[in-house]
Amino acid sequence: MIFTGGTIGSKTEDTTVSLGTAPYTLLEGAVYNGVIFDCFEPYTVLSEEMTADRLRTLADSVRGHLDSCDGIIVTHGTDSLVYSAAFLGYLFADTPVPIVLVSSGYPLDDPRANGRQNFSAAVGLIRSGEKGVFVTWTADGVSKVHRGVRLLRQLPYTDMLTSLSGGSTQGVPMPCPDDLSGFGRTVYLTVQPSMWYPKLDESVSAVLMVSYHSGTLCADERFAAFMKSADKLGIPVFIAGAGGRDADYETVRKYRDLGAVPLPMASPDAMYVKLCLAASLASDAEGIRKTMLTGFAGDFAE
């Protein structure tokens, strides 16, 4: 058990949710015949406070226990869960034991909480021996298992977890960079009508844009100017949300012609993590582009 905080380790006091003083509450009353839990706390934060440094600390903690257990359960908050799950999914695609992230929609003292059900599903998954990085989530009494690199970010006002299916779930891991500076040099944009485009400079390594649901964006003169600036600086621009379709709208051809690179069907959030890793590993745009178009950890759902 690796405890990191989050709602699953929090409590509600005076209408404020804050980190609880007893992170092991999840284990109280938990009886699983033959199961022994070894507990560790590399850090304790609300998951909206996740940083690249904490991701590395989490990965180091997981790596340090792979050879001494039958499986690893990581407790985690819901806000940045999809990013941590993707990060671990990329680094530990060849894990010798199951790694399962567990969270809760509400603090455990709230009757609406599903943390204990998610935890129970995680124990069952580890007992099955299936290898990989997963997230368990329970809704309406049904527990589902999601691949770490296939999760989709929750919609506003809901904590419901969904993920992409299809394609191969097999894949090789990505190497962990010596530093994670790519997390500070990657621009993430969601397309909007008449959207604002930031001014790019040499500090930016790459750009990820999340398209409309049909894989499109407004490839007008403003977008063209943005692409021209990116090309001048040698900054690759990738489009997430454009893959997996039988036919493309003509605007997809337009942004292709302007130099934007549509990615295969994959979780946009996993693609952000992948791009940050790629920007930390590669020294040039071509290296980043090659990494982004190569499947790792079964991230492409086509």
Image (tube, helix red, strand yellow):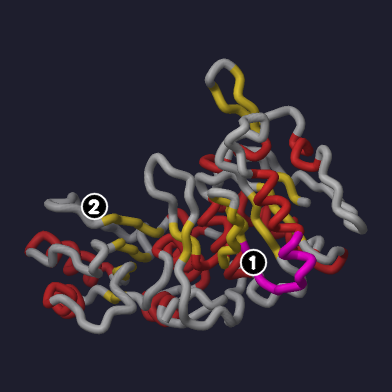
Q: Residue at x 19, y 79 (%)?
A: 248
- What secondary structure is marked by label 2? loop
The image shows residue 3, relative to residue 126, as above or below, that is above
Q: Residue furthest left?
A: 221
Q: Residue furthest front?
A: 141
Q: Residue furthest top?
A: 14
Residue at label 2? 198
- What secondary structure is marked by label 1? strand
Q: Percent x, y for residue 289?
A: 38, 78
| Residue 133: mark in rendering | 1
Q: Percent x, y for residue 198?
A: 24, 52
Relative horizontal placement of residue 171, taking residue 269 as reference (left or right): right
How far apart in space, not on screen, are marks 1 and 2 (Cα)? Answer: 35 Å
* Type of the residue with mark 2: Pro
Residue situated in front as seen by the camera: 251 or 36: 36
Q: The C terminus is located in which quarter?
A: bottom left
Q: Residue at x 58, y 60 (%)?
A: 144
Residue 134 found in image quarter = bottom right
Q: Percent x, y for residue 21?
A: 74, 28
* Magenta residues (range): 124-134
* Type of the residue with mark 1: Val
Q: Earlier in the sequence, mark 1 or mark 2?
A: 1
